[in-house]
Amino acid sequence: MASQVPQILASPISCNMENRPKADFHPGTWGDVFLNCPDKDIDITTQLHYEELKEEVRRMLVAPMDTSIRKLPLIDAVQRLGVNYHFEKEIEDALEAIYHDNNEADNDLHTTLRFRLLREHGFDVSCEAFYKFKDEERNFKSSLTNDVQGLLELYEASYMRVHGKDILDEAISFTITHLTLADATLDYPLSEQITHALKQSIRRGLARVEARRYISIYQDIESHNKALLEFAKIDFNLLQLLHRKELSEICRWWKDLDFTRKLPFARDRVVEGYFWIMGVYFEPQYSLGRKMMIKVIAMAFIVDDTYDELIPYTDAIERWDNKFMDQLPEFMKISYKALLDVYEEMDQLMTEQRRQYRVEYAEKGDDTTCSSLSFGSQMDSSKLQTNIRGV
């Protein structure tokens, strides 16, 4: 196969962009909304207060309690407010103690909350505790419906189920029925929590989106922790500012490439791609990873949308070399050069960190993706020809 490559690339491929199949992707909707970012930084007074609040929350997480399980509501609030990435060790240590604590949870809410939090963190915790919620006829006790907050926690815990554990499947059906009935009779903020939960459980939410939503709810819960709430608000604003700066940088990079004019058939989805990456890792220490990954994703869109002239483009990508660019049609040169530039930038940044080996893995992954696109496109073409012959 390798010996055929020079023949394939021996002369430029003639291809007219106007003759390409059109996918009719709708144009990008964001325009220049994120092109510029407010140039503001946190003042020293706010920064100092922020650090003080952070230490106060840390002290609460490590403070001894009469039983370790009493710390569950605090851990849950820290997670749902989106600041748990500051206290990973403290939370892990607390949950480790809770896992090994033989004292049975003293109420239904603690039972379900313990189960959910431990499973979220990978602990092998049994569903056996939920059988205490059933009566002699193996139905869920009607008394459970008297505690709507506990019912909501049972609902959320049920989404941590695994295959073969029927009791949690039954719990979902039971809680959905009774939460739906109770929702219309409740006051804010509990009513809002239930309405949202029935649409989307905690397990299925995106961390930053859910944090912003929960901040608004948590501040109206009478028992909220003021220091934690204030810390979460400042932290959200700081992290949002960082994300805005990153997105602004990415949008400028994308606009400079001018793909919307040069390759009008391709998708303009760089903002959506950045949002997708935010669902993978949002923490500040992964800033470089986010910026590199969105560039790779954006180029994957372009490569995918360019994939009609299969063999020459696949061969060029497998070689990662500018000298093969002259063998490509003009519109393919645009995306190929941009792709090489992204990986060249990645190579320079990783070399500075002595992690250059990571780029090789990324390139191999891109090769695999392109080979898959090539195969898929050939199959689509084959099916189209078969259908035409059939007609």
Image (cartoon, grey):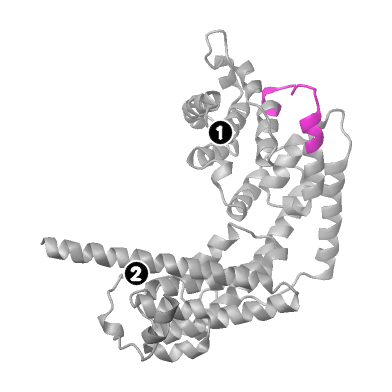
Which residue is labeled 1 in the image? 162
Q: Which of marks 1 and 2 is in front?
A: 1
Could you say which quadrant of the image residue 284 lies in?
Answer: bottom right
Left of 370 or right of it: where is 226? right
Residue 300: image x %, image y %? 47, 71
Residue 110: image x %, image y %? 71, 28
Residue 297: image x %, image y %? 51, 69
Front-lying residue, 280 or 175: 280
Front-lying residue, 153 or 306: 306
Residue drawn at point x = 47 percent, y = 66 percent: 369
Q: What residue type is labelled 1?
A: Val
Left of 255 or right of it: where is 235? right
- Marks 1 and 2 in Cβ contact (< 8 Å): no
Could one spot residue 69 in this view of the protein? Answer: no
Q: What element carries label 1?
A: loop
Could one spot residue 232 in this view of the protein? Answer: yes
Magenta extent: 96-110
Q: What residue type is labelled 2?
A: Phe
Which residue is at the far front? 3
Which residue is labeled 2 in the image? 25
In the image, residue 282 sits, relative to residue 342, either above or below, namely above
Mark 1 to mark 2 CA distance (whole Å) = 38 Å
Front-lying residue, 178 or 184: 178
Which residue is at the far top? 136
Residue drawn at point x = 65 percent, y = 64 percent: 240
Residue 30: image x %, image y %? 46, 71
**Pointer 1 local density, CA inside 10 Å: few below 14, some 14–19, many at least 20:** few
Residue drawn at point x = 77 percent, y = 54 percent: 86
Left of 3 or right of it: where is 144? right
Residue drawn at point x = 48 percent, y = 41 percent: 199
